[in-house]
Image (tube, grey):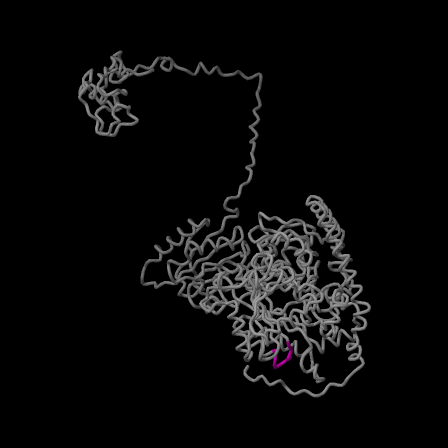
Amino acid sequence: MSDLQTPLRPRRKTAVVDFLVQFRWIVVIFVVLPISFTMYFLTYLGDIRSEMKSYKRRQKEHDENVQKVVKRLKDRNPSKDGLVCTARKPWIAVGMRNVDYKRARHFEVDLSAFRNVLEIDQERMIAKVEPLVNMGQITRVTVPLNLALAVVAEFDDLTVGGLINGYGIEGSSHIYGLFSDTVVAYEIVLADGRVVRATRDNEYSDLFYAIPWSQGTLGLLVSAEIKLIPIKEYMRLTYKPVVGNLKEIAQAYSDSFAPRDGDQDNPEKVPDFVETMIYTPTEAVCMTGRYASKEEAKKKGNVINEVGWWFKPWFYQHAEKALKKGEFVEYIPTRDYYHRHTRSIYWEGKLILPFADQWWFRFLLGWMMPPKISLLKATQGEAIRNYYHDNHVIQDMLVPLYKVGDALEWVHHEMEVYPIWLCPHRMYKNPIKTMIYTEPGFEQHRRQGDTHYSQMYTDVGVYYAPGPVLRGEVFDGAEAVRRMENWLIENHGFQPQYAVSELNEKNFWRMFDAGHYENCRRKYGAVGTFMSVYYKSKKGRKTEKEVQEAEQAILETPIAEGSVLAFTDDGVLPVSLVFDALRELGTEKCEPQIVTLSSSNQLPVGSSSVDIVFTLCRSIEFPNEQLLGEVSRVLKPGGTVLIYKISDASTGETDKTTSVLERKLLLSGFLEAKALQVKSSLPSELSFGVKAKRPSWKIGSSFALKKTTKNLPKIQINDESDLIDEDSLLTEEDLKKPQLLSSDCEVGSTRKACKNCTCGRAEEEQKVEKLGSTVDLSNFKSQCGSCGLGDAFRCATCPFKGLPPFKPGEKVSLSANFLTADI
């Protein structure tokens, strides 16, 4: 978009609600701020009290609270009680959307006790925490240890549970991804009351990948194990001003953290922290940070800026000084840097309290800042809430890095909101297609910031009143958000679900992928127990009837007979060909997933999630051993693999190729590999095929064998019948002693070898005759030096093979009974 001219809008008429919003600062200063400060102080005391408890006590209390949740779920009557949700009040959530679904009848589960840091494991570099632990609490525990979560969201009040089930990002996300990408394990209470631990590689790996962005609609999160990283005491922050158009600003932003040579994993070229703030359509400041030690920060000439003090200028205003001052460097205490945007709520505080950024207010009342977002939501009425929906924008646009320039121009043209926050994050290429996913084939383009395993995205943070509203012009906020969501869908972008959404159900699932999420909903019993993520995120009030009907519709939707994955080494794989082949197996109701040009040897589905794998190959080298290993991984136990080969019938190598494919399958661990008789209903190019099954057991698994005791047949003995004497069955010939043949080697006291000896005695006699009864070793010289040590050390051609050990220079006499048997 090259035309940056914003559309002309008519003047907006002033209403009563405008005055309520304009003078809302009175309520904020005299009501919200005192209560907020009290709540912050009480929360701090509770955190200190929790930290004083021993690990065993905290873990014991955690286990007891988990059992209370389990009992609560098991007490639910599905036919009478509503859908399950947490008992947390709607206004407490930090998100901007109104949690209207809780106004309908629901079955509430209290999770308010889950707010403890359970363990900081410095050996495994893991923090085990409960879902209501917030960012301020976790940094207060870890930073003194020179440790931190890999991704620390800016606001103190943001909780672990919200960041996992929703969306969390920070300036380190260009290295570690989103907050949910740093989680090692989840502890989840499922709909049926089971408590499971889900990791990337255990039996609940499908649930592990489905939890992020699910908004708590798959189960109740009760703890999480999160990755820790080593840090230093200070952040060395560089402020670099950028002047130019929006496309040039976007390029300067990309260059600040993404090397153009593609060396994205080089720590020498990639900073630890990145963010950019755009103040006008032509001015921005790029900030890059690296961890620094206390010794480095306190060297003579270095500037230390403790931005955490209440009287300090707000961070975004302090950074703006670089536009006049030019590039400069300063050192900020690490924990202060983590929460640099908390006090001013980015720049939203300027609208809530227009004079809060003045020096006199900061000195007098700055220590009470910021007001709790939850209290701000609680004190706004329906009219003010609707006003903000129509005349205010709080949205995050997650877009690929190479489209940031287009996104900035779109925001300027449609919303004209400044400042704008830019923060990069990695979107990982997961083995399972999750709700948010990378662009197909992104790794082939090798764009700036991308790697072979992740695509670089950017959060375009749009928070403030649009320019038309500030100028008193008409602005339709709902329509602007609707157009933004359509732009994101067309450009493979995503909208975090904390914000107000105008998406209908069809467009919601155009933006997000429902496949894996819905499969896990069915598999783990969430359907009919928890609300769907769409209805939980939907704008407006949700009635109980509406939600129940939506859940019932999901339950009544027929499930496919089997999930099918099809891939090929060719450029095209016709879907009709897949259905024709599956019909031969008697499987017609299915929803095949098609993967073409599968050269990466990785299949984008979860482990043990597919019933049938269909492969169409032209080359005999395809599929290779690694790809067959992937097929074994994704197949369910007992699943079927079909390999159809396209070849020229004139070659006449059908039988040979079939045997090669069968051997490949058997060596890869498949069972019952056999050739398929291709029926006339299939296309003629399918010359032949091979079918095999994955074992119903896992490699390396063990199980106890059941001992079967066979009952002996019952014999009825008649005491009156005569028993047979078995000795009477022997004849006189049977009782005679057998006579050995005269030619046997064992006959006679001399034990000479027989004429046709095959036992080796004849060879021993010849050796004795050759050497004589004595052997003179006085002049003997052994070439190997081992002849005298015995047969165990002699070579195969040694002339003394079979003789006892001796010392060189002595005579060895053979005893008369040398060839006599020992027994």
Which is nearer the eye, 710 or 566? Answer: 566
Judge from the rendering whether residue 574 lies leftward or rightward of residue 361; answer left or right.
left
Q: Residue furthest front?
A: 300
Q: Is residue 276 above or below residue 731?
A: below
Which residues, given as a range, are shown in magenta?
411-418
* Residue for point 56% across, 34% down: 708
Q: Is residue 570 left or right of residue 107?
A: left
Residue 276 location, quadrant: bottom right
Residue 414 included in the magenta stretch of the image: yes
Residue 55: in magenta span:
no
Horizontal and vertical percent position of residue 710 = 55, 31
Q: Residue at x 69, y 61 (%)?
A: 156
Q: Using the rendered image of the protein, determine whether residue 633 is visible from the camera's viewpoint.
A: yes
The total number of labels drawn is 0
| Horizontal and vertical percent position of residue 553 | 68, 65
- Is 399 located above or below residue 624 in the figure? below
Q: Is residue 749 above or below residue 321?
A: above
